Amino acid sequence: MVDPPVTLAFVPRKPESRLALVRRARRINRELAEVYPDAHCELDFGNPFQLLVATILSAQTTDKRVNMVTPDLFARFPTAADLAAADREEVEKIIQSTGFFRAKTNSLLKLGQELCERFGGEVPHTLEELVTLPGVGRKTANVVLGNAFDVPGITVDTHFGRLSRRFGWTTDTDPVKVEYEVGELIPRKDWTILSHRLIWHGRRICHARRPACGACPLARLCPSYGEGPTDEETARKLVRPGPFS
């Protein structure tokens, strides 16, 4: 007689205490580190200015698409001063394929001007200053701080928010509240890399519509196990190989 398969789903025996939640969150972070040892920002950049511009362009499009247009953009406008003096139509033509190109062009031209007028053409190093720039919110600011300046920050994009809720780390949908609640569970030094790990996991396995639960290495730690197919063969077909850059 063959033993029945063992379900690896996370099944709490009693309401989860705060201490248990913290321990489980940190265990998930450690296991994600093993699954995605090469997790990193998938936007191509050579300096803080390039990362800031690329992150603004990444709104409502893919990193892959942004990486296709930024080489031409940075070759033509390598500094904030160059961007501040740029011809609008030329910028629009270069970034058109990223979508919302007129609004993005407005943001980029104003960004170049304000960087020159207020910060000597350099990208500021603090969240408080970054979010005052055109086209820059907390998410963009944390991307730049974490990846260009090594200042820990949590990037709450759609993947990060979705997985945080599925993991039971938060029930909130407000990105700022999610950022603070998750930040209380994970050591500050890990905030930036945690963001990459969750984004990679969301792109590859924990999809919005049909998460590949049966192929997920975190199944035994996840209270949302079962939202997607739990059969391994079916789930494997849903896994999307990276990279997505």
Image (cartoon, helix red, strand yellow):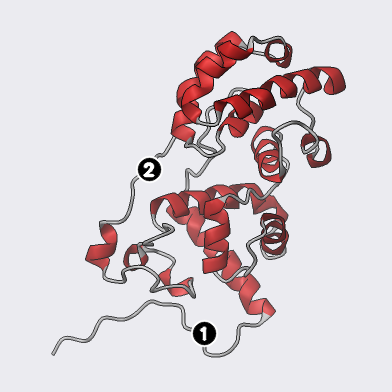
- Image point (44%, 58%), residue name: 208
Q: Which residue is mark 2?
A: 242
Helix, strand or loop for disc 1: loop
Q: Residue 27 location in percent, x, y?
A: 55, 67
**Residue located farthest toward the left when viewing the structure as drawn:** 1
Horizontal relation, residue 245 to residue 1: left or right: right
Horizontal relation, residue 75 to residue 133: left or right: left
Query: As shown in the figure, which amino acid type bears the numbered disc 2?
Result: Gly
- Image point (59%, 67%), residue name: 25
Query: As shown in the figure, which amino acid type bears the numbered disc 1?
Result: Pro
Residue 36, visible in the rendered structure: no
Q: Quadrant of residue 118?
A: top right
Comparing 100 with 85, the one in front is: 100
Q: Which residue is mark 1?
A: 12
Q: Residue 144 location in percent, x, y?
A: 67, 36
Q: Is residue 186 above or below residue 155?
A: below
Q: Which mark is residue 85?
A: none
Comparing 174 with 188, the one in front is: 174
Q: Between marks 1 and 2, how big is the CA–CA gap? A: 32 Å
Q: Residue 44 location in percent, x, y?
A: 53, 28
Q: Is residue 37 above or below residue 119?
A: below
Residue 60, visible in the rendered structure: yes
Helix, strand or loop for disc 2: loop
Crowding at mark 2 (Cα within 10 Å: few <14, some 14-19, many 20+): few
Q: Earlier in the sequence, mark 1 or mark 2?
A: 1
Q: Quadrant of residue 23?
A: bottom right
Crowding at mark 1 (Cα within 10 Å: few <14, some 14-19, many 20+): few
- Image point (41%, 70%), residue name: 219
Q: Residue 51 location in percent, x, y?
A: 62, 29
Comparing 44 with 210, the one in front is: 210
